[in-house]
Structure formats: C-alpha cells, structure tokens
C-alpha cells in the first residue's frame, strides 16, 4: 500500500486512539492542544513518508511521534506542564523519561472515558454525536455533514459551541456513575452506529465497503459489553445488529470492489460464525423489558441474514419497521420500510407510500422509485434511475445505477 492510501486508513483507525489518550492527559479544557498534536503527527507522517518511504511499523511510528511531540510541548510550556502533570518537572530534573501511555489498556480506557465525556447531556444530542464522530472516530467535517444531512458550516459551528460548553463546565474525562451511564448510553451507541454505517456504505468516492471502520465500531461496542456498568440490553442489540451485517461482508462486493445487491449475493459466503454471534447477542439483548431501535434493527438484520427463505420474513420485517417508525421517525427508515412494503403488498401500494416521502435530495429515494416502477412503467423507472445517478455522491453508487439503467434499457428494447 502506498503512502497516499495508508495515511487516510491509519487516520481512521489510530486518530481516535491517540487523541483519546492525549485528551485524558490534557483535560477537556485543553482539547485543542490534543487535537493539534494529533493532527501534527499525521501531517508529519504524510511529509516524512513521502520523502523517506513508509516505516516498517507505521502505527508504532505514529505513537512515537505523538509521544515526542507531547513531551516537547511540556518542555516548552513549563508552567503549563506543572499544572497539568505536577510531577513532570521533578521527573525531568531526575532525568526520568516522561511517558505518554499509549498501551492497549490505556487506549481502551481512554476511549471509553472520552466518549462518555463528549456524550454529555449539557450539550445537545446532535452536538454530542458530531463531536464524538470528529474526535473519537476521525470523521471529516464533510462526512459528519453528510451523516446529519446538513452543510459543513453548520457542523463547524455546532462543534465549536459544543467544545466551548464542555470547556466552560470543565467536564472530567472519566467513566460516569452507573445512573449517569444509562441516560447517556443512547448517544454513545448512536455514535458507534454511525461509525459502523460509514464503513458499511462508505461516503468516500471510490470505496463501497470499509471493513476497518465496521470492525472499529464492533470493537468499541465490545468494550461496552465487557464493562459491567455499560453491558445493557441495547448495547447487546447493537452488537447483534452489527454481527448480522458483518456476516455478509464477503458477499457484498465482487473481486474489484463493486457492490453486489442483496438478492444477487452468494449466500454460501455469509459468515456462519458471525451469524451465530449475532443470534447470541440478540438473545442477550432480550433481558429486561426494553425495546430500543437497536432491538428492532437487529431483528430486521436477523431476517436478512437467514439463508433459508421463510414465508414470515417480509411480514416480520415490515412489522419491525412499523414499530421502529413509532419509536423514532426517520426518513431513511421510512424509505427502507417502503421496500419491505413492496415485498408484502406489492409495488403499487409501495409507490403510493414512497411518493409521500418526497426525499428529493436523496439518491436512494429515486433509486427505490426506479425499482418500484420497473415493469409497471419502465419509462418512469429509467427517469428515476437517471435522477438517482445524477444525485449520487459516491462513484461506486453511480456505477451501480449505470448498470441498473443499462439492464432496464436492454429489457425495454427487447
């Protein structure tokens, strides 16, 4: 892998680890210092590796640079270092090396503590998610804007206000009490869920599936399950959902990375071990009386990961979507429900529901209409697929829609 491809990949996997440790060290009040050091580390990597080549262990190189930059900062700001790390000066006088702990355990602990510090009810839920995606998940401003269906300027303002509020309240980077955990867990899970979704259907131009992001989301969820305080039913439901989706990774793309639609996937490639894990976590999530959106989405994913067609499948999926919309309405959920409705009640009934949504900026909306009108009115279907292709931001989505158009045009001409 060349330097141009490796840096963004490492940014996605290592940025959150480094910045979590540094934020814990500097405190939320000085979050910009942690951000600057982390960003400078990756900038130096880009500059150095282009000239000298990629080091044998790129991750260790990044950690070493981050440590050295942190030490240098404390040396240059003696008064500051005495306030943040009181024994730093005495350590330097005794020539004992000051350590920035980037051990796996401290990285894990710091990430969990940091995500709960950010997902704090003193700032709005959307700001919590946006800030966590930016700091802990390494998302770019444009990626966050796409996740919230808004523009970059709005996201920048939202993140700035959130940081100022956390700074003003001097929020501690620590795992909250058990009572506080429950009230803040939903936002934490939503952040992890968005991280998984970005990997499952990437917003980048040339990559459809980014497994490393999905695996990071699953890893963060597993940390929550391992911790007795955060091991809640909705956490297990989210893990079940991700296991079911991850079970189809190998079948979702062909040898050159082009997407393979669900109906066309080779089911022998579905991972039985991950399906079994999904079933395990789904059973674990059934403890108690809670029914969260993650329970319902995990139930939908369960039916989608079943290799044997069951006559109850689409009825069950449609019912789950109906419940999901009652718990938390989302245009995307409504759109997905329309596809399930078509399987149960036919395309005409689904068209009537779909056209009420009017999601005119969403290329998936026009793609769905193209599918629904196929065979009923191919001329309209072609028009909708063309609109979807025009609005698609991902080159792979455009390629997939081009294929659909060609297939439909060929059928219409025969």
Image (cartoon, rainbow, N blue to C red):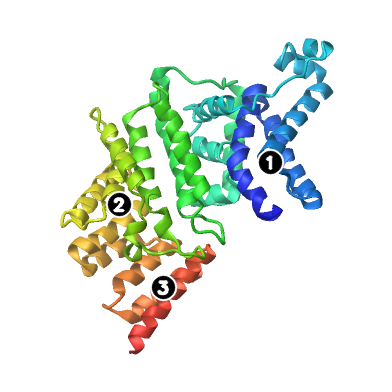
**Disc 3 marks which residue?**
385
Q: In the picture shown, does residue 162 fall above or below 319?
A: above
The residue sitting at 57% across, 46% down in the picture is 154
Measured in 3D between alpha carbons, the distance from the residue under mark 2 to the one under mark 1, in whole angstroms, is 37 Å
SS for dot 1: loop
The residue sitting at 64% across, 28% down in the picture is 102
Between 345 and 256, the residue placed more toward the observer is 256
Instruction: Please tell me whether mark 2 or mark 3 is closer to you in this view.
Output: 2
Q: In the picture shown, does residue 321 fall above or below 221?
A: below
Say whether marks 2 and 3 touch (CB < 8 Å). Answer: no
Instruction: Please tell me whether mark 3 or mark 1 is closer to you in this view.
Output: 1
Q: Earlier in the sequence, mark 2 or mark 1?
A: 1
SS for dot 3: helix
Q: Earlier in the sequence, mark 2 or mark 3?
A: 2
Please rate how many residues cluster around mark 2, counting C-alpha atoms within 10 Å: few if below 14, some from 14 to 19, many from 20: many
Say whether marks 3 and 1 touch (CB < 8 Å). Answer: no
Residue 56 point in image, percent of width and height: 71, 43
The residue sitting at 37% across, 39% down in the picture is 238
Answer left or right for 84 relative to 164: right
**Disc 1 marks which residue?**
57
Which quadrant holds residue 63? top right
**Disc 2 marks which residue?**
305
């Amino acid at each position: 892998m060349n330097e141009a491809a490796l840096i963004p990949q490492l940014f996605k996997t290592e940025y959150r680890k480094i910045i979590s440790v540094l934020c814990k060290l500097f405190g939320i009040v000085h979050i910009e210092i942690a951000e600057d050091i982390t960003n400078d580390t990756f900038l130096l990597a880009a500059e150095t590796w282009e000239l000298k080549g990629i080091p044998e262990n790129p991750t260790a190189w990044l950690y070493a640079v981050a440590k050295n930059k942190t030490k240098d900062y404390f040396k240059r700001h003696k008064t500051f270092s005495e306030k943040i790390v009181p024994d730093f000066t005495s350590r330097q006088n005794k020539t004992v090396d000051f350590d920035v702990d980037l051990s796996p355990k401290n990285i894990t602990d710091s990430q969990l503590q940091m995500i709960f510090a950010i997902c704090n009810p003193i700032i709005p839920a959307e700001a919590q998610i946006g800030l966590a995606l930016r700091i802990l998940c390494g998302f770019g401003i444009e990626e966050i804007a796409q996740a919230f269906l808004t523009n970059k300027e709005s996201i920048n303002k939202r993140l700035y206000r959130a940081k100022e509020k956390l700074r003003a309240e001097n929020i501690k980077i620590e795992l909250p009490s058990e009572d506080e955990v429950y009230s803040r867990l939903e936002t934490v899970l939503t952040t992890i869920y968005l991280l998984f979704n970005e990997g499952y259907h990437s917003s980048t131009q040339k990559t459809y599936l980014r497994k490393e992001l999905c695996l990071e989301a699953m890893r963060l969820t597993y940390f929550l399950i391992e911790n007795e305080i955060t091991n809640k039913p909705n956490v297990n439901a989210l893990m079940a959902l991700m296991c079911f989706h991850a079970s189809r990774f190998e079948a979702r793309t062909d040898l050159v990375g082009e997407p393979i639609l669900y109906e066309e996937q080779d089911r022998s490639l579905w991972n039985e071990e991950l399906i079994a894990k999904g079933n395990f976590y789904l059973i674990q999530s059934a403890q108690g009386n809670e029914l969260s959106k993650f329970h319902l989405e995990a139930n939908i994913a369960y039916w989608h990961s079943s290799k044997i067609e069951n006559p109850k499948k689409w009825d069950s999926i449609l019912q789950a979507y109906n419940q999901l919309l009652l718990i938390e309405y989302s245009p995307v959920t409504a759109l997905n429900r329309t596809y399930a409705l078509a399987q149960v009640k036919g395309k005409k009934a689904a068209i009537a529901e779909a056209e009420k949504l009017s999601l005119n900026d969403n290329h998936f909306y026009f793609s769905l209409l193209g599918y629904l009108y196929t065979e009923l009115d191919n001329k309209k279907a072609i028009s909708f697929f063309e609109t979807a292709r025009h609005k698609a931001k991902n080159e792979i989505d455009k390629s997939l829609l081009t294929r659909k158009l060609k297939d439909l045009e060929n059928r219409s001409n025969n």
